[in-house]
Amino acid sequence: EDKVVQSPLSLVVHEGDTVTLNCSYEVTNFRSLLWYKQEKKAPTFLFMLTSSGIEKKSGRLSSILDKKELFSILNITATQTGDSAVYLCAGTYVTDKLIFGTGTRLQVFP
Amino acid sequence: GAVVSQHPSWVICKSGTSVKIECRSLDFQATTMFWYRQFPKQSLMLMATSNEGSKATYEQGVEKDKFLINHASLTLSTLTVTSAHPEDSSFYICSARGTGGDQPQHFGDGTRLSIL
């Protein structure tokens, strides 16, 4: 059965800390892996990863995919209180459906 | 770019009524739209995949007669919850995917549905 597993389930840090969120997947006919940030409403798109070993970066956020070991990480450096959210990882396969992990709840305190 | 608008954002109605939720891609064309349901503190659960001009594909366990999906144009899909009951209360979210190549799904802001 296809599945996406995220760890840790929750994380509490202080502003300025660096965090690493993990995502492992088992998806038949895997196509790409996506990261989303969900605050109070619907998820907002962060990254889409299709190739192994190529880091994608956006400001303080970066992500990389390892297709051999079937995992991805999302790094956030110099965290801010505005980074507090649930971070969702999802794998897609040939039909473009997304299989979501349960998410990592990040809380950043000042 | 890649803005998806969902309306209404919140609706409360009596048991037995039908509720229509609209999902629009504002600045791109979406041949495929998706409808999800999310329970508190849980992840998104795919309900159905909607392709423009054809019938929606429903996930296992989702009643197609209960959740009617129409995708009449490249920018609009609708979900109608028919004869809604309290157990249908949930957060419903749509997403849209652009045409061509590897495109991510972009999500609307969701609709919180409360059935009394």
Image: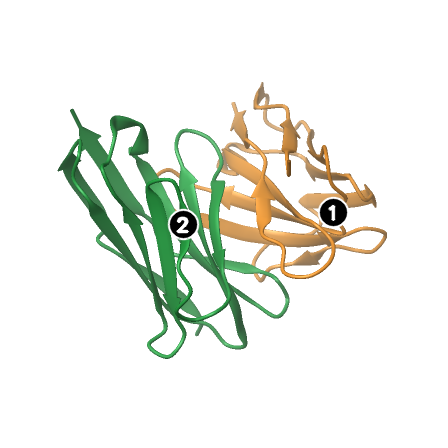
User: In the figure, residue A25 lies in which quadrant?
Assistant: bottom left
Q: Which chain is orange?
A: B
Q: Using the image, determine if residue B30 lies above or below residue B100.
A: above
Q: Chain of mark 1?
A: B
Amino acid type at circle 2 is: Lys
Name the residue: 74% across, 54% down: B99
Q: Which residue is mark 2?
A: A57
Picture colour scheme: by chain
Q: Comparing marks 1 and 2, which lies closer to the viewer?
A: 2
Disc 1 target residue:
B30
B51 sits to left or right of B89: right
Mark 2 surroundings within 10 Å by alpha-carbon count, few (fewer than 14), some (14 through 19), many (20 or more): some
Q: Check residue B1 in the rendering and tell me which mark sits there, or answer none.
A: none
Residue at 37% x, 61% y is A64
Q: Nearer the viewer, residue B10 or B109?
A: B109
Say which chain is green: A
Residue A12: x percent and y percent?
A: 16, 38
Can residue B57 be seen here? The reply is: yes
Instruction: Identify the image quadrant of the N terminus of chain B.
Output: top right
As helix, strand or loop, the secondary structure at mark 1 comes to loop
Q: Is residue A9 visible from the viewing direction of this image?
A: no
List x then y, in percent, for residue B79. Answer: 69, 39
